[in-house]
Image (cartoon, grey):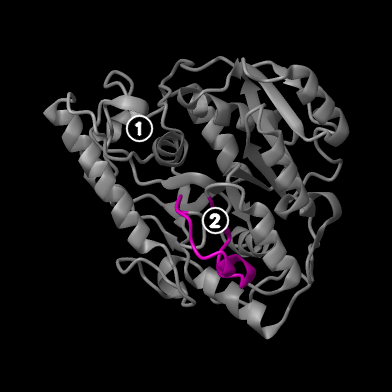
Amino acid sequence: MYVEKSEDSGRNKTESQELDLLFKMRLQLKELRPENEQTTRLEDFRSTTQSNGFSKSELNHSISNTSVYYRQQLDNAIKSLNFIPEDEYLRDNSSFFKLHSHVVNSFVPEVLIQASPSCPNDSPFLLVALLSVPMNSARRRAVRKTWGSIAQGKTWPRKSVSVNVRLLFFMGINSAANMSDLKAESERHGDIVLGNFQDTYRNLSLKVAFVINWTINYCTNTKHLMKVDEDTFVNVPLLIDVLQNVSRQHESYIIGFKHAPDKPPVVRVNRWKVPEDVYPLSHFPRHVIGASYVLSNEAFKKLYTAYQHMPLVPVEDAFFTGILAKTMDIRRIYSPLFASGFEGNKCLLLEDKLVSQTYNGDALNSIWSFIVDDKC
């Protein structure tokens, strides 16, 4: 949840201060993003596997590429993981993070277009839920031809994946969409799930709830659920190996790129407005950025329970990976290899130094060419 500085001279002083603060957050976060060939981590995080809760046991490889270089990159990826600290600044507000005894959110959107098959008989190790919108067929086509192709043939240039991966595009209804084209696309690929809700930014939390509810109902045994934005490229083989190693030691967790600053402020204005009657506190719990994050099976089931019994906050990443995760005592794991929301060096994906990265424009094809040609 970031905003640019507004040029509107009529906004009041409070709004200006909040927007200036978020602009500074963007600059701070950008400085944290790895841009060179070194494995990086935030300075205030501990750097050894003993101190961050991840043991130095022999790494587990699901990928056939066991070259010395790849093993070293995977080792670096595991070493870079750290638990996000507890939210000590919210200690006096702990009573807020309790489930309501009654159901608060009972709306479950009807499925208008169903994926076929909805879930393989052997539930996938990884279900990738890509949040799309109906009119973005070109972007979905690019994903299917590039990093998403691993969900079709279990192949990746110079690597072979030994676990099941499923990729689905989740979306709501939109007045600008051509429904006949969307249905035809669904019949060709079988990877679209359309819900009966308005696909707007303010409904993003509802959209993620729809994804989790669908997964519980149609793919309940999937081991990991990844939420990813459609402008993000995912290094699926490296991600799988990271998850294999994390899941050996923990059952209930969320993993992604940590939001900055250390005490995320609540915005009361503009697109990111959160009403005080919904969330009265001035800061969110620490959470991960919404561009891409992964939920373990136990985590996404806990999150849906919490979603039903907590007021809906329209800031999706803060709501699910912060408020609800804190409420349900789900481990939040920071990885600097996940997408930060800013563009970075495309070569780092080829070099297995990033799990995911976000790009403006249509860069998926060029990144995939780097991977296919093994050069950047």
Check the image and report above or below for 347 versus 138.
below
Contact, mark 1 vs mark 2 (Cβ under 8 Å): no
Give the spatial CA distance, label 1 vs label 2. Answer: 32 Å
Using the image as rendered, state which of residue 181 and residue 281 is in the foreground: 181
Which of the two discs, 1 and 2, sits closer to the camera? 2
| Residue at image coords 71%, 70% | 61
Res. 263 visible in picture: no
What span is in magenta?
340-359
| Residue at image coords 54%, 28% | 305
Amino acid on which disc 2 is placed: Gln
Quick one: SS at disc 2?
strand
The quarter of the picture where the N terminus appears is top left
Percent x, y of residue 14 = 15, 30
Using the image as rendered, state which of residue 250 and residue 36 is in the foreground: 36
Furthest-left residue in view?
13
> How many numbered tags mark residues here?
2
The quadrant in which residue 93 appears is top left
- Dot 1 or dot 2, earlier in sequence: 1
Task: Report crowding for label 1: few under 14, some 14 to 19, many 20 or more residues within 10 A (C-alpha).
Answer: some
In-image side of 333 versus 192 (left or right)? left
Picture disc at residue 300: none
Instruction: Say if the magenta span includes residue 108.
Output: no
Question: Magenta segment, principal secondary structure?
Answer: loop
Percent x, y of residue 241 = 66, 65
Amino acid on which disc 1 is placed: Phe
Using the image as rendered, state which of residue 257 and residue 24 is in the foreground: 24
Residue at image mark 2: 357
Residue at image mark 1: 97
